Image (cartoon, coloured by chain):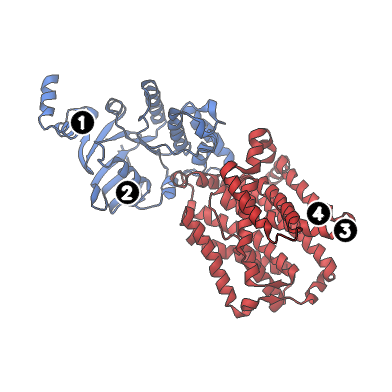
Amino acid sequence: MSTLLSVEGVSKQFGGLRAVQSLTFEVHEGEILGLIGPNGAGKSTVFNLISGVFPPDDGRVVFRGADITGDPPHQVARHGLARTHQIVQPFMAMTVLENCTVGACFGPLNMHLARGRAAAREAAALVGLDDRLDMLASHLTIAGKKRLELARALSAQPALLLLDEVLAGLNPAEVERMISIIRAIRQRGVAILIVEHLMQAIMNLSDRIVVLESGRKLAEGLPVDIAGNAAVIEAYLGDPGLAEKLRSGHR
Amino acid sequence: MSGLTGAASVLRRPFVWVIAAAIGFFAVAPTIGADVQLRESLLLAAIYITLASNLNMMLGYAGYVNFGSIVFFGLGGYVCVWLINSEGWTLAPAMLAAGVSVSAVAYVFGLGVLRLRGAYFGLATLGVNEAVMAFVTNFTPWGGATGIYLSTELFKPLGGPRAALWTIYYMLVAVMGLSLYLSYFVKVSKLGLGLLAIGQNESAAAVLGVPTPRYKAITYSISAFLPAVAGGLYFFKSAFIQPTDAFDLTLSTEAIAIVMLGGQGTVMGPALGAFLYEQLRGWLLTSESFSSFQLVIAGGLLLAIVLFAPEGLMGWLFRRWPRMKRVFD
């Protein structure tokens, strides 16, 4: 499988805090890679470093063979990399359709307005917002805004989608729906890098998992291996002996 | 072929005709009975509409409050008057040169100033105006603090002073019309979509791929062109320009009040606001006891609008009659 995104020895420091330390991982074409870790592990910082919100202090980010290290966000987007925000950021006074049209028109395909609107409708339909195209974003529910965030990113027809906690704050029915939407997106050949706190969901969705702790990579592998990894359980639960106890209890 | 169908689809938009009607009114009304007083009042209204419509592209679309927008008007006036007076140019090329050169300067300023956001941007635009005024005040080729006087001889090519005033009026009406069309076509274009996104949430817009630095600088530059041309025409008409008139922040403030009054971000709002404000101003100026009382009113209006109707007149109308939005927006 060929590499779509490679993060090579990337570091970022905020004052005295080493948010990310020489982190290396790859996202392959068409896969869902889960990025997990306790609060403050540096997951959102990794997203910001990849999408160009701020540049890394060290290391390289290579996307589809192009070095995008330190490129501003609008240039990163043009390469075909789209993201959602942990705290949704819709254009409140614009309609659902207009929100998505922005994503389509300024994405990698540089569509003109008419074509952008068509792509926007399609993306809105994929997340189930096609009946609310003319509604103002500010009038959507939280779940609706989360789906809009996703539709807006999808409208660009990206090669890689970064999803930052799209399941947080949703009720179980909404979570189910969102998971099936994410699966549908992957069916279209879009690779996904996902940060999520809902363990069951991310273990189910992901092909592979990277675990972060204090800005370092703690483990990497298939979901089954990660779920049984003593160091990972320790990082989450904080008790060195707990992993062993849990495992013996299970078997 | 696609150009033809494009033109046809443009003509089908009702708004294009709304603007045409406004231009028609300005062009015809004062000619009935050669009403010079009405012409002078409408001339000022046309200038206000030009300034407000262009300001609206930064303020209403992109959400950047430009307190020093008058610098374009003043600088355009200086370039035009100087080219005519010292270099022997005629009015038409001189005013176009004013527009082009001020646009170019605005683009360069824009790339720098537009890195700032919010209040810092507002302060920087005040600074740009003050800096340009200080420069011109000390720039001897442009007459320094005393400014430049034009000889009335220069009106001769336009058929003498009386005919020249009418010609200048029609030219300003044309500049006003172009401002409205520009404002409209920017709004319905991809540039406009990007600007509206910037106005809502600049970081999110950038993440979606909107080239924010370039779009803002382009808009700053575009919105400088027609005010500069209007400045050229206005100061040619006055036959006199000096720094305190050219870079008078009063006009900047009035332009902001007008945009807010009419409804920021709408195409027709600034025009409506400008027209009403000019009428109000004319009415207040006729009372001898209050000189410049319109400024007190403008300040009060601005305060009332920001507090009670931040969407302005058009916003209020659209909320009352949502169907109007299809024709007027």
Judge from the rendering whether residue A182 lies leftward or rightward of residue A248; answer left or right: right
Q: Quadrant of the N terminus of chain B?
A: top right
Q: Amino acid at mark 2?
A: Val
Residue A208, image x and y in percent?
Answer: 27, 32
Q: Quadrant of residue B94?
A: bottom right
Q: Secondary structure at mark 2?
A: strand
Residue that label 1 marks: A226
Q: Whole-Å distance between the Cαs marked 1 and 4? A: 77 Å
Residue that label 2 marks: A61
Residue sitting at x 59%, y 78%: B139
Q: Secondary structure at mark 4?
A: helix
**Which chain is home to disc 1?**
A
Closer to the observer: label 2 or label 3?
Answer: 3
Res B34 label: 3
Q: Whole-Å distance between the Cαs marked 2 and 3? A: 70 Å
**Which chain is home to disc 4?**
B
Q: Earlier in the sequence, mark 1 or mark 2?
A: 2
Residue B240, image x and y in percent?
Answer: 71, 72
Q: Is residue B81 visible?
A: yes
